[in-house]
Amino acid sequence: MKILSLSNAIKLMIVIGLVAVMSVVVQSCQSPKSGLEIYRTKSLNKLHIMDGAPIQPRSTFKTAAGQEMALSDYHGKYVLLNVWATWCPPCVAEMPSLDKLAELRGGDRFEVVTISMDRKAEDAEVFFERYNLENLTAWHDPSYGLSARVRTRGLPISIIYDTKGRELARVSGEADWASEEALELIDHLLDRPQ
């Protein structure tokens, strides 16, 4: 007994071919990948490229001493923005690796910016002093609205911005920013032509 006649086999092959062609057409119409997906491994396994990412916040942030800055002050550099708090255990755990990243890669083209969501700016400053975090500035968000503006529900959140302030990727939760994969990601960005 024949299960598939010759004419049905030909029809089936035509349908499979059309599905394959449509798949290629659909993939070619999608927006190109950023190339950062290959770094979604090990401690960066939560690296996410967000469609329709929010614009870079335009807020002003302060230190305990009253120094002010806005993220737009860093245009022309890649920025790793980390929103954190001293009462958040995963935030506390990753802070030394952010300090190390700032030491190893910080400079004219890259900046690590940490913004505390603590009640007082002094909380972050005391934390930095206690743990000898010497390569970071203890910025604070006096409005406490930064988490909402970057569209996150939890801390920590790390967002990578390009030199024009556009979001490239984000990591929700703790990451090892001094790891080989994190350093390779930052090197990849810094190797891009400007």
Image (cartoon, helix red, strand yellow):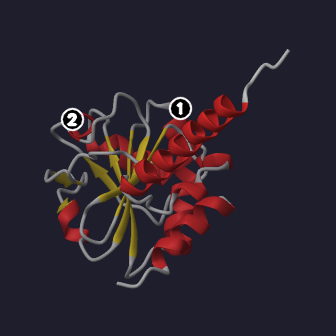
Which quarter shows the N terminus?
top right
In the rendered image, the vertical position of residue 86 relative to residue 4, given as above or below: below
| Percent position of residue 2, x then y | 81, 19
Question: Which mark is on residue 143?
Answer: none
Left or right of 116 in this view: 39: right
Q: Which residue is mark 2?
A: 144
Q: Quadrant of residue 17?
A: top right
Q: Residue, x 37% and y 45% (percent of image)?
A: 50
Foreground residue among 120 and 109: 109
Q: Quadrant of residue 150?
A: top left
Q: Residue, x 54% and y 35% (percent of image)?
A: 90
For this orientation, the residue located farthest to the top is 1
Q: Residue, x 44% and y 30% (percent of image)?
A: 87
Foreground residue among 54 and 87: 54
| Percent position of residue 54, x then y | 23, 46
**What amino acid is at disc 1?**
Pro
Tell me which label, 1 or 2, sits earlier in the chain. 1
Q: Is residue 154 visible?
A: yes
| Helix, strand or loop status at disc 2 | loop
Foreground residue among 142 and 49: 49
Q: CA distance from mark 1 to mark 2?
A: 19 Å
**What amino acid is at disc 2?**
Tyr
Left or right of 147 in this view: 81: right
Q: Which residue is mark 1?
A: 89
| Percent position of residue 183, x then y | 59, 66
